[in-house]
Amino acid sequence: MKKKHLLIVGCLAVSILLATSFIGIGETLQPKSEDSPVSGYSLRPEFSLPDLQGKVRNIKEWDGKFIVLNFWATWCTPCRKEIPEFIALQNEYADSNLQFIGVAVDNAVSVDTFAMEMGINYPNLIAEMQGIDLAVQYGNTIGALPYSVIINPQKEIIFRHVGLLNPMKILDITQLSKD
């Protein structure tokens, strides 16, 4: 029954991915003001998940940095396409307060194999199917992958994006420069 559930969810996710794979839907959020409390930043939800070594990691570990939190899966073609760009940005901007974190809606074996092949240089947390619920908490109302949010050093979600995320958009939102 569990495999059947995973297959159904996988098919649904692939359908949504096909619909969004060639477009990106991004939302740059505005700071809260007394006049527009609904459109303002929101604090990021806290969570803990195991990494590829099985160590439970908490999002608080990266407080004080700009975080690009990327929900992805190994079976997601657009996800696989954007990861090399994330690897490059992590290399270039790690000293500038930028941290990528992958949240894999996938199993540890598949993620570990892919991470080794790609040389992923940032933490990947294994969420399996609970990653979908976590992505919803972070604003992914349509359940599509890839889904990314940018969190500022004050723990506020300042950008949400469905689909491929352009590296230049990350730099534009964070206003980071190489040190």
Image (spheres, rainbow, N blue to C red):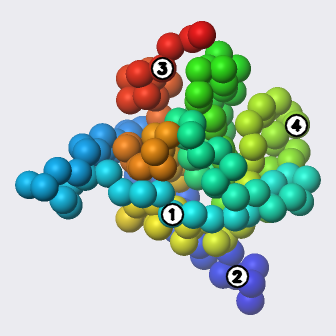
Residue identified by numbered label 2: 4
Amino acid at dot 1 = Pro
Amino acid at dot 3 = Leu
Q: Residue furthest left?
A: 35
Q: Is residue 139 above or below residue 121?
A: below
Amino acid at dot 4 = Met
Determine the CA span between mark 3 and mark 2. 45 Å
Q: Is residue 163 above or below residue 46?
A: above
Residue identified by numbered label 1: 45
Of badges 3 and 2, nearer the viewer stands: 3
Give the quarter of the image for residue 161. Answer: top left
The spot of residue 127 in percent (x, y) is 70, 64
Of badges 2 and 1, nearer the viewer stands: 1
Which one is in front, 129 or 5? 129
Amino acid at dot 2 = Lys
Please report whichever mark, 2 or 1, sits nearer to the chain's N-terminal start: 2
Which one is in front, 27 or 11? 27
